[in-house]
Image (spheres, rainbow, N blue to C red):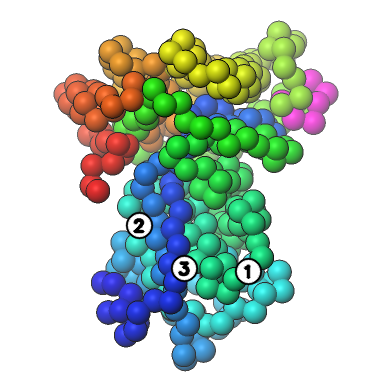
Amino acid sequence: MNFQKIFGKPPETEASAPGRVNLLGEHTDYNDGFVLPTAIPQRTTVQLGSSTDGHHHFYSEDLDERVSVLESNHTPSGFASYIFGCIQLLQKQGYTIPSLNLHVKSTVPIGSGLSSSAALEVATLRAVRQLLNLPINDVEIAQLAQQAEIQYAGVQCGIMDQMASSLADTEHMLFLDTRSLERRVIPFPSGAEIVVIDSGVPRTLAGSGYNQRRGECEEAARLLGVKALRDITDSSATEVLPEPLRRRARHVITENNRVLEVLQIVETFHETSLQRFGELMNASHASLRDDYEVSVPALDTLVGMLQKTAGVFGARLTGAGFGGACVALVAAGEGRGIASNVLEQYNQTGNTGRILVPATDF
Ligand code: ADP
Ligand code: MG
């Protein structure tokens, strides 16, 4: 149901923000390293108006759920916690926020690793900024969005998702140094586009596996005498470590180097640069599979099929792993054809995959 039907009057303003996919730099953000996400075409739109009864009212058309916040010191649960967190943090910055009617509608798949949560936070903050003419910039929006997710939704996330949603678009990738927040918004290579396919394997072990890998990286950094693995650039330094720490650290170090290599070649993008970009994505997948051990057979199958397909520069699992999605860099104009061919092949192996990008539903 639209804003008018839910709240009985039209919205006063609206803003939107995209989901994202990470092209390179996986499991590097909690090692103070480098990431390279880009925005996807799917977006979350937030419409706003003021509420006259002194309470905030949030409605998600996608969930068909309405939540009213009756007490401002009580964080609601579920999707409302992300929105409430954004509003609370703005108030803590000293801004006076009136009671709001807020309507959410999104084309970003929810819970598929394309960061619908960051898109919701960034769209909310953009809409409030616009309604009240607040002097906050896009980096501050990303930082507030990350804090809303950590402090109010209870998700210990890095800043990649929110920075990508706030600073990138489908024509640009975001190179981000997660330690210094130094960044470059880089034009997406004109000869290429992105394919994202969900493997259909749920990310069941993702939580425990993620925490275990984080612990292993901290231990490896401690044994090597550095603050974080980002401080090492030569992977032979890992030879003194016991297994499996040696392979874990080697993934992080080589992955950071792969992101830095792409950053160097993007300046002069041409056909061979795209091939090299693809090779680095393939190498990233092998490293995630063999050294970091976060792939599963279905992801390896899907990535293998993508890598063998004509028109594909490179492919890898994207996100934390243990299930979830794969991303491929493919020749411009060929994404839709490649995605449906590979999906058909993949689904014959007894899996139920799904094309996420190029978007089919709009
Ligand atoms: P993702 O990879 O999509 O970010 P998360 O688990 O981090 O997955 O975030 C998904 C959560 O974000 C949902 O469970 C919901 O609470 C919230 N959310 C995202 N998009 C919407 C939406 N359009 N409407 C309501 N809630 C949303
Ligand atoms: Mg999320």
Please give left or right for residue 162 compared with residue 331 in the image.
Answer: right
**Residue 25 can be seen, yes or no:** yes
Residue 35 found in image quarter: top right
Other-residue count near label 1 (Cα within 10 Å), few / some / many at <14 / 14–19 / ≥20? few
Residue on which disc 3 sits: 80
Which of the two discs, 2 and 3, labels the residue nearer the N terminus?
A: 3
Query: Helix, strand or loop at disc 3?
Result: helix
Which of the two discs, 3 and 1, labels the residue nearer the N terminus?
A: 3
Numbered mark located on residue 106 in the image: 2
Residue lying at 71% horizontally and 31% vertically, measured from the top left? 218
Beta carbon at label 3 within 8 Å of ligand 1: no
Placement of the N terminus among the 4 image quadrants? bottom left
Tell me which amino acid carries mark 1: Leu
- Between the residue at mark 1 and the residue at mark 2, the CA separation in whole angstroms equals 24 Å
Beta carbon at label 2 within 8 Å of ligand 1: yes
- Between the residue at mark 3 and the residue at mark 1, the CA separation in whole angstroms equals 22 Å
Tell me which amino acid carries mark 3: Ala
Q: Is residue 154 above or below residue 54?
A: above
Is residue 4 part of the magenta span, yes or no?
no
Of labels 1 and 2, the one closer to you: 1
Query: Helix, strand or loop at disc 1?
Result: loop
Residue on which disc 1 sits: 134
